[in-house]
Image (tube, helix red, strand yellow):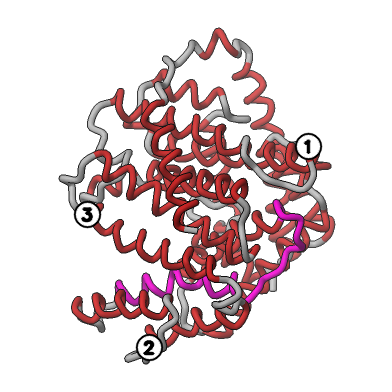
Amino acid sequence: MYERYDKLLNEYLNTWDHYTPSPIPSVFKIRPFYSTKQAIRYFRLKMKLKQVCEMVRKDKKITPETHTHLMTLVSLWLNINAKVINQSVIGDYIKTTETFITRVQTRWEDIDEESIFQALRNVWIMNAIQMMAGQPFELTDAMFAYSMLYPLTDNLMDTLDISMHEKRVFVEKLGQRLRGEQIYSNNRHESDVFEMVSLIEFQYPRLKYPEIYESLLQIHKAQVDSLEQQNSSLSMDTLKYLTFNKGAASVVADGYLVLGTLSNEQLDFLIGYGIVLQLADDLQDMKIDASVNHSTLFSTQNSLTSKTDTLKKLIYFSSLTLEKIVTQNVKFSTDLKSLLSSSMTLLIGDAVHEQKEFFSKNILKYIESMQVVSLTQHANLKKIGKQYFHSGTGQGSIFPPSPKKDFLILYRNNN
C-alpha cells in the first residue's frame, strides 16, 4: 500500500505545483442575468425551508411527508434532480446516522455533542464510499471504531488530567497497538482507544487484510507529523506535503475500512478527495488558524493574490478529483459526480463567505456565480433555520450555521 500511496500522493503534489491558475473572468460577461435566477431560487428555498421547519417543529419528528419536502429542499439547495436522490438510500443513510448516535450515547453516556458530530462526519464519508461501491448503507464495527478514534484521541490529548509526557507516551503506544502489539492501558482514555482498535481487528484479521493496518499507521504518522504545523517557519514544500498527506491518509483509511482492499483507481480518487476536504477545512478555519499560529496553505499566505491562487487551485482540484470517481455503473457515476460537485461547490462557497474579508470583490462575485443562491442569501437561509427552531421551542436547526450542536438536538427531539 505504501508504495502505491506515495506514488499517487506525489502526483497530486506535482499537479498542484505545476497548475497555473487563470485570471478570474468577468462574472457579468459569463452570466449576466444569474443574480435574478439566484433571487428566484432563494425565494423558493426560503419558503420550502420554513415549511419543513414548521412540520418538524409541529410533529417533533421527520414524518414521511416531511421527508418528501426535505428531499425537495435538498434538491433545490444542491441544484440536483430530485429523482437522483433514491428514497431507499436516503432512508438507510438516516438509519445509519441514528444507529451510530444511539451506539455512541449507549457506550459513553457523558460524551459531548461536538465529539459525536466530529465522529459522525467521518461516518458520512464512509457511507459515501459504500454508495460508490454499490454496497448497502450499514454501520459496521470497523466504521464505528475508526470514526470514534477521532474524538477519543482528541479527548485524550486535550485533557488536563494527563501530563504532556504521558501524552507523548500514549502517541507511541497507539502506534505500537496499530502495529499489532499487545499494549496495556493505563487509564480510561487509553482503554477506550485500544478497544476501538480491537473492534477493527475482530472485523478484519490482520493476516488477511494487511493493507488496512498499513493505512491506519499512515494516518497515525500523518497526524503526528502534522503537529509541525504549529511551527510558522515551515517551508512551503513541507507544508504542502503535511497538508496533502493528512487529508489523503484519513480518507484512504476510510476506504480500506469500508472495502477491505482498494484498486489503484479507487486509491487515486480517495487520495484526491481527502486532499480537497482537507483544503476546504483549512479554508474554513483560515482566520482561526492564523490567530493561533497554526500553519496551513491558507493561513500562511499573506497577500491577496496568493490566497486567491490557493483558492483557485482548490476549485481546480475539486473538479479534477470528481472526474476520478469509481463506480460500477456509468449513469450512477454521473449522478454521484453531480451530487458531490454541488456539495463541494456549496462547501467552498460557504467557507469563502466566512472568510470574505481576505478576498477581493471580484473573486467573491466569481465564487458567488457558481452558487445556486448568493453567498449572503445562503447565510440568511442558515440563519432562518437556526432562528426558527430556537424561537422558544427548544428545538435544533435542520441547517444550522454550527451543526455540531444543533444537528444532535434535532436528532434527540426526533427520537
Q: Residue at x 22, y 52 (%)?
A: 292
Tell me, yes or no, if residue 394 can be seen here. no
Question: What distance separates the C-alpha of mark 3 from that of mark 1?
Answer: 44 Å
Which residue is disc 1 drawn over?
81
Q: Are marks 2 and 3 in contact (CB under 8 Å)?
A: no
Residue type, label 3: Gln
- State the image coordinates of residue 381 (x, y, percent, origin top left): 58, 41
Secondary element type, mark 3: helix
Disc 3 vs disc 1: Cβ atoms closer than 8 Å? Answer: no
For residue 231, say whether it is visible: yes
Residue type for callout 2: Ile
**x%, y% of residue 116?**
51, 69
Would you name the residue on which mark 2 appears? 183
The answer to whether 270 is drawn above or below residue 146 in the figure is above
Indicate left or right for 17 with 42 as reference: left
> Where residue 84 sits in the image (x, y, percent)?
79, 42
Residue range highlighted in magenta: 131-158
- Upstream in the sequence, badge 3 or badge 1? 1
Q: Nearer the viewer, residue 374 or 313?
A: 313
> In the rendering, which numbered label is found on residue 238?
none
Amino acid tagged 1? Asn
Q: CA distance from mark 1 to mark 2?
A: 51 Å
Say whether disc 2 or disc 3 marks the residue closer to the N-terminus: 2
